[in-house]
Amino acid sequence: MPRRTIPEVVAHAAAAYADLEALADSEGVRWTFRELGEQVDRCAGALIAAGVRPRDRVALWAPNGRRFVVAALGAVCAGAILVPVSTRFKGEEAAWILDKSGAALLMVENGFLGNDYLAMLAAAGAAPPVVRLDEGWDEFLASGFLTPRATVRPEDPADMFFTSGTTGKPKGVLAAHGQDIRVFQAWSDGVGLRTGDRYLIVNPMTHTFGYKAGVLACLLRGATMVPMPVFDVEQVLTRIETERITVLPGPPTLYASLLDRQAGHDLSSLRLAVTGAATVPVRLIERMRAELFDEVVIAYGLTESCGTVTVGDPRAEPALMARTVGTAIEGTEVIVADPVTGQPAEPGQSGEVRVRGYNVMLGYFEDPAATAEAVDADGWLHTGDIGVLDADGNLSITDRLKDMYISGGFNVYPAEVEQVITRHPAVSEAAVVGVADPDGRLGEVGCAYIIVRPGVACVTEQDIIGFCRERLAGYKVPRFARFASSLPRNASGKVLKYELRATT
């Protein structure tokens, strides 16, 4: 059976993995792949009966769960373009996404965590046609008719995920059916996802890490989805135990939390971790491998690359795994561009990471100027990340171009400083930003924000600075260290450094 479009993937999973458990919801609902396929067919039929047409944009504002899975897959099986909306958004943010995407319909789980999303939208002046997942959902599914899935082609757009917006207004990134499938077949091969794996989906499904590397990957492989609507450390630990979870992808902060709170829980079922939403401290990888997982994979991607650029080798030596994010997925190219010539740099030389291949987005929705700026005439996607390739094609991400700061004429890459700070035995997480030098001599200096490990005795600013001074050149040593209970993050787990800079 061909699997070139998402409707074909749904049909294949329903047939090939028919009686395997497809989904175990936090509300106690369990479906086989055959039952999941039936639910998706009903949703697609109801959407078509409601007037949704191929290439209409259908927005989805809901948490991880069975309803999100059915609504998302139902939309794309009806031929629509899925537009996920983060559950963290407020009314004006969501209204902006709905307007920018030209959404014909909004599917919403109103009242999640006490949020009246519809009232928020009304206050922002938005009143789109709505289908509610929290009220009348079963009646909506019954309102349509079972119909053959819409005819879509591999090159047709399947989804529009908006960029994380860490540096400005988010842009709608279009990806095609064929791209999504090929990328996450390669991702699943690379990380070693297996039929029968039990996959805890903590990453928001409104992000590519949760939907594409979660829902789509499980459909492609026949792995069980165990979605969690809210990240709570104790609930995650309990869910791992009761559902015998084997696969747990997530941002680095998730694993730091589990490592600090794992006592008293049976986590022996865990096999595979996949991370890489931010620079990953070497010390964290060492602890994950020693205490929780047999296999840890570091992957790298961005929304504009359908979520994936490189995948590490689970069998790699720990030292290599800790310092690189792996090699380009099958059939794609990655280079590090020389900062002067723009040509491929020599192995070991730093420059901007650029990507070319089937994983490069179709473009930004209705924004040809921004698309041309991001993807050059030769098809290279300019990622804005700084990296180094070794002779074997393993990529190391040094930092974001925008996060680098200059202190006394020297370039400082915060990720390097963060790696050092997280080796301090009292530190769980760290984020470093450049701030104005109060003395006015060096231009900018470093300010480190620190989360201390639970139960650790007092640690001071001078402890952290002294620790760095013993291990880093003077211009890299932070001038300040601030202690915090949490760091501001977007839905994908990336630290919002502009917020840290604004509070310094």
Image (cartoon, helix red, strand yellow):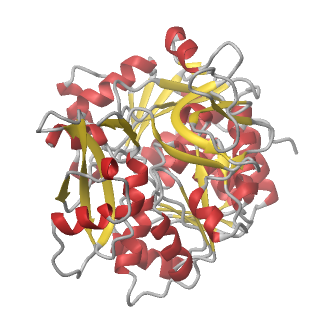
Decide if residue 359 is in sight here. yes
| Relative to 261, residue 299 above or below | above
Q: Residue furthest bottom?
A: 264
Question: Residue 377's spot in the image, x, y percent?
Answer: 68, 12
**Residue 495 rendering spot, x and y as whole percentages:** 34, 47
Q: Determine the image quadrant of residue 197.
A: bottom right
The answer to whether 294 is drawn above or below residue 147 in the figure is below
- Name the spot of residue 216 as percent of width and height, x first: 64, 48
Q: Quadrant of the C terminus?
A: top left
User: Residue 225 lies in what quarter of the image?
Assistant: bottom right
Q: How many marks?
A: 0
Rendered position, 13 above or below 122: below
Residue at the right extreme? 1
Q: Is residue 22 visible?
A: no
In-front residue for pair 68/439: 439
- Nearest to the observer: residue 121 or residue 196: 196
| Residue drawn at point x = 76 percent, y = 61 percent | 18
Quadrant of the image containing the N terminus: top right
Q: Residue furthest top?
A: 369
* Residue 386, x across and y down, in percent: 52, 38
Of the pair 107 and 142, the residue shown nearer to us: 107
Q: Is residue 27 left or right of residue 271?
A: left
The residue that appears at 48% across and 50% down in the rendered structure is: 277
Q: Is residue 18 left or right of residue 439?
A: right
Q: Residue at x 61, y 19 (%)?
A: 375
Instruction: Judge from the rendering whether residue 92 lies leftward or rightward of residue 414; answer left or right.
Output: left
Q: Residue at x 34, y 49 (%)?
A: 476
Question: Which one is nearer the viewer's eye here, 325 or 440?
Answer: 440
